[in-house]
Amino acid sequence: MAVRRVVPNVQSEAALESREFYGLLGFEEVMNHGWIMTLASPSSPAAQISFMASDKTAPVTPDMSVEVDDVDAAYAAVRESGAEVVHPLQDEEGGVRRFFVRDPNGLVIKVLGHR
């Protein structure tokens, strides 16, 4: 299994202001579903940051997203380890398959893959 990207998810009610601020650092909006907005570097598209008030499709808002090339293998490894799965593996709109797990620091990590 390989990691494709890691994206911090900032819980925020100031998405528009954040877009303007991070635009000063060279980020551009690459996704906006109304409840989540992702900014990325045009010169290095895997360098991203997301802003959301809350996750509208899950019971908890993740602190970080980790995209992997085999989300099913990651889910199996996490379940086998005994780590706390806080949102089960499922397919979402837009071709994303994901689950949420709590890390040893208490952070909620969204692990995802694209179908």
Image (cartoon, grey):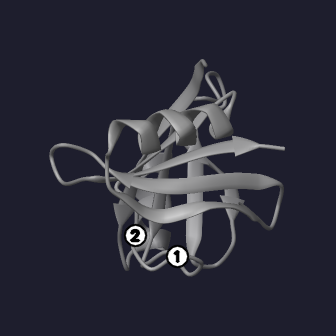
* Residue found 35% across the figure and 36% down from its top: 81
Q: Residue 61 carries which label?
A: 2
Residue density around tag 1, few if under 14, some if 14–19, many if 20 or more, within 10 Å: few
Q: Kindly identify which residue carries mark 1.
A: 58
Q: Which of marks 2 and 1 is in front?
A: 1
The picture quadrant where one finds residue 10 is: bottom left
Q: What residue type is labelled 1?
A: Ala
Horizontal side, residue 63 vs residue 40: left or right: left
Q: Between residues 98 and 47, which one lies in front from this camera angle? A: 98
Q: Between residues 89 and 66, which one lies in front from this camera angle? A: 89
Q: Which residue lies furthest to the top in this view?
A: 2
User: What percent of the width, then of the height, locates residue 78?
Assistant: 43, 40
User: What percent of the width, then of the height, locates residue 98?
Assistant: 62, 53
Horizontal side, residue 113 vs residue 54: left or right: right
Where's the N terminus, which quadrant?
top right
Q: How many marks?
A: 2
Secondary element at image label 1: loop
Residue density around tag 2, few if under 14, some if 14–19, many if 20 or more, within 10 Å: many
Q: Between residues 38 and 18, which one lies in front from this camera angle? A: 38
Residues at circles 2 and 1 in contact by the CB criterion of under 8 Å: yes
State whether residue 47 is above or below residue 43.
Answer: below
State whether residue 69 is above or below residue 21.
Answer: above
